[in-house]
Image (spheres, rainbow, N blue to C red):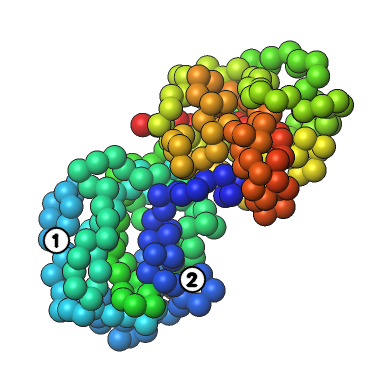
Amino acid sequence: MRRLAATTLALALLLAGCAGTSKSDASPSPTETPAAAAATASPADVAALDAVTVAGDAGAQPVFTFTQPFAVTGIVSKLITPGTGDELVDGQILAVHYYAVNGTDGTDLGTSFGSTTVPLTMGDANNGDEMNAALAGQKIGARILFGVPGAESTELMLIEIVGAKTVPDRAEGEAVAPVEGLPTVTLAEDGTPTITPATGTAPTTLVSQPLIKGAGAAVTEGQTVTVNYSGWLWDGTKFDSSWGASKFTSALTSGSIIDGWIQGLVGQTVGSQVLLVIPPDLAYGATEQGTIPANSTLVFVVDILDASA
């Protein structure tokens, strides 16, 4: 549920948000690969990005040299260094480093080099068409440079693809007997959950009940988890789901996700499916959140597919 995350470290945000552009008004991404995307590039924007030089070894924060101010009219990308590893596959969780600067004066806008990598789901619609076009056909190790126009300035950003991991689509493990008094969960053939609401008053304390016990390591606070999930109100009204869309990735840290997810998923094992019943004080409290009314108890079925530092 995208509403769950107060922030997602989002290369997609850097690409389509922080610079003041949006998916609806941005030009299609030109990139050296695939050729079809490159053909849509404005010649002036391609020339502007070609004039930027990038120095630095793989794994190190790059150094950009360019004439200031740097500006483009649409999102443009360029493959700086081809990857030599395996080709990327849609649905994989990529480990990515990034570095971004302001094109007007070269000031730093953020970096992950020298720290932990950023997770990015290959082919996820939330990345934006431009990012996905630039990643298509690339291999692990690739370095890609972006120019992103904004309301006040253009941003220069480089990403380096450090690794890629294929994760399952659904929980895998030993079934756990259901507990009376909780919503009943039924799984479709592909694993998509539905619920039959429980009767009676909603619990006032957090419920974290495994439905499938996975054989992976226990999740710890601060890790980044990748999940498939569906969410309902206590009365069974569905408000969100990642099933049929794309897996959801978020850090289990305060400010990144609601507290009920942090408390409910920490200690559960990778591969597990967990039923969460989250009281309002661990969710959105007295604040209405989209289609979620104020003071709502939330019910989630969460398949924990991966967890990483």
Q: Tell me the amino acid under the disc marked 1.
A: Val
Q: Tell me the amino acid under the disc marked 2.
A: Ser
**Is 1 in front, or is 158?**
1
Q: Nearer the viewer, mark 1 or mark 2?
A: 2
Mark yes or no: residue 235 visible. yes
Q: Position of residue 121 (x, y in %)?
A: 47, 48
The residue indicated by pointer 2 is 22
Above-or-below relation of 13 to 91 = below
Residue 164 relative to residue 246: left or right: left
Q: Mark 1 or mark 2: which comes first in sequence?
A: 2
Label annotation for residue 254? none
Q: Secondary structure at mark 2?
A: loop
Q: Residue furthest right?
A: 199
Residue 153 relative to residue 133: left or right: left
Residue 219 relative to residue 150: left or right: right
Q: Position of residue 21 (x, y in %)?
A: 44, 72
The residue depicted at 77 percent of the width and 35 percent of the height is 234
Label annotation for residue 63? 1
In the rendered image, the quadrant that contains the C terminus is: top left
The residue depicted at 19 percent of the width and 46 percent of the height is 59
Q: Position of residue 139 (x, y in %)?
A: 34, 51
Contact check, label 1 and label 2, Cβ < 8 Å: no
Above-or-below relation of 155 to 213 = below
The residue depicted at 25 percent of the width and 82 percent of the height is 47
**Is 225 in front, or is 51?**
225
Q: 10 Å neighbourhood of mark 2: few (<14), some, or many (≥20)? A: some
Q: Quadrant of residue 79?
A: bottom left
The residue depicted at 86 percent of the width and 25 percent of the height is 200
Mark yes or no: residue 229 visible. no
Q: Position of residue 235 (x, y in %)?
A: 82, 37
